[in-house]
Amino acid sequence: MKQFNNITIIGVGLIGGSIGLGIKRKHLANKVIGVFRRKSTLDKALARKAVDAGSMTIKDGVKDADLIILATPVHLIPGMAEEAMKYAKKGVIITDAGSTKKWIVDKIEKIVPHSKFFVGSHPMAGSEHKSVEFAVSDLMEGSPCIITKTRNTDKTAMAKLVKFWKAMGAQVKVMSPEEHDVSVAMISHLPHLVAFSLAGAVPIKDLSLAAEGFKDTTRVASSDPELWADIFLSNSSRLIKSGRTFERYYKKLIKALSKKDHGGVVRLLKSAKSKRDKFVYGKNS
Amino acid sequence: MKQFNNITIIGVGLIGGSIGLGIKRKHLANKVIGVFRRKSTLDKALARKAVDAGSMTIKDGVKDADLIILATPVHLIPGMAEEAMKYAKKGVIITDAGSTKKWIVDKIEKIVPHSKFFVGSHPMAGSEHKSVEFAVSDLMEGSPCIITKTRNTDKTAMAKLVKFWKAMGAQVKVMSPEEHDVSVAMISHLPHLVAFSLAGAVPIKDLSLAAEGFKDTTRVASSDPELWADIFLSNSSRLIKSGRTFERYYKKLIKALSKKDHGGVVRLLKSAKSKRDKFVYGKNS
């Protein structure tokens, strides 16, 4: 069911490419245009049919767009949104796929012109990979997608965006950018930070002994460092705060261990397991 | 290729059951006998053909054994080894599948009679599940298996055990119990402790927003609390020491974040990623 005539995706990596493939699989637009920094990525995206056409400039890429999706690294989003809004037609809806929301939404809401609409999104899917080669059309299927609402959010634009992400298969939730950043610091940014720390701390000689537990616990430490430095820094105060909650639990466990307190250790592990067992994930838990 | 006439597995859960299935698939023994605490588990193990016959007592279960494998929780291993050695015939080889080695090996070496042989093993495979229903015949395929060697270790018995685990598909490494415990604290026990802490710290309301990153990073927090309390406590001093190495890396990252030190964050994430990318796991990395 077509929801938009033209959709432009700025930044066609794993996320942007998967969104393109998803739009085409679900027939949500007549045309998907990609905006690229590198010609080689444009060629790959066209070969994978993640987009119908590509442009090397935002100006050309967005001029006919009814929906623009910014899927670049976080720190580039506000600047690219500004440029996209400049060249997009009236009535355009602009959204993003950034992992932090407060910083992005605050910056863009200050510059969005009256006749154009910005609503923040965070499709919570992905993997440790980042390029369009790893894009899949069902990446959003069953994944959470947060849409941010502020007092400036246009209700009609937001409703269209909710409908769009639902059609992509996502479990849509609407919340404020602040609420998003607090929750996501805990549930996504912190696990990444901890996984990087675990991988970083391991002596190389021990790697040959690592098995399934290490493999899964540190999988996301193979993610792109620049991308994640960017995400961590754009949400650093909330991330540090989530870190303190984690540290308290961890220290309680260490304390119980150092006291050889069997009952205490079991209680803490049971409480952790009971939470983990409540977690049911769209695709497979 | 038959390596033993009779193999007895004491404790037929995920690990013991998978070893049984593996022995039978590779035809490494004429008969596999299981020793059980619960009749219901015995029935399940027979139904899954993880063992050829079952016994509810160690005395009966081990009397014809040429190889005895103890696959019970860690704290039960030394006591059961003592009982098994009492009723087993001369020349028997006894090993275990415990996740800690120093505590187990020290205890058993003190009580092993002259005509019987104990060599510690740690097949490093498993999952968050613990019962025989989840046993699979290829669990050891490509997984590391550590065999411990001390000044008391009988060379012939050890060579037979190395051959056995290799035939099961494992990547065998021989080291001292101390070396094992230091490495495994870092590469296995610590990731489990951290995963439990992450899951334990998460507010339940945020669980519905969790996605792939959280899923993998905390998967092992669904493991059995009693089993892991047992493992953590049997290796607590080394685990706490590994924890300090992890904490140093984590704190460096938090410090760089709090100083908004982009270059510092990127450097730490890059170093972590480069280690994680070096990790190649038998089955799939």
Image (cartoon, coloured by chain):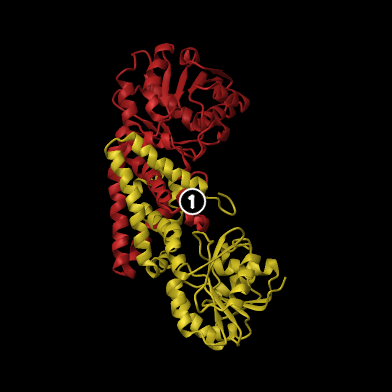
Chain colours: A red, B yellow
Of all residues, the one furthest to the front in this rendering is B151
Determine which residue is flagged by label 1: A216
Provide residue A13's location: percent of width, then percent of height: 51, 30
Residue type at tag 1 = Asp
Of all residues, the one furthest to the right in this rendering is B1
In this picture, is A87 found above or below B153?
A: above
Q: Is A209 on the left-hand or right-hand side of B170?
A: left
Residue at coordinates 45% horizontally, 62% vertically from top-left?
B184
In this picture, is B156 found above or below A71?
A: below
Provide residue B266's location: percent of width, then percent of height: 38, 37
Q: Is residue B144 visible?
A: yes
Provide residue A238's location: percent of width, then percent of height: 29, 40
Residue at coordinates 29% horizontally, 59% vertically from top-left?
A252
Q: Is B36 on the left-hand or right-hand side of A240?
A: right
Q: Residues within 10 Å of mark 1 (few under 14, many from 20)?
A: many
Identify the image quadrant of residue A26. Answer: top right
Q: Closest to the observer: A104 or A155?
A: A104
Q: Is residue B202 visible?
A: no
In this picture, is A216 found above or below B7?
A: above
Q: Closest to the observer: B18 or A65?
A: B18
In this picture, is B85 found above or below B169?
A: below
Q: Secondary structure at mark 1?
A: helix
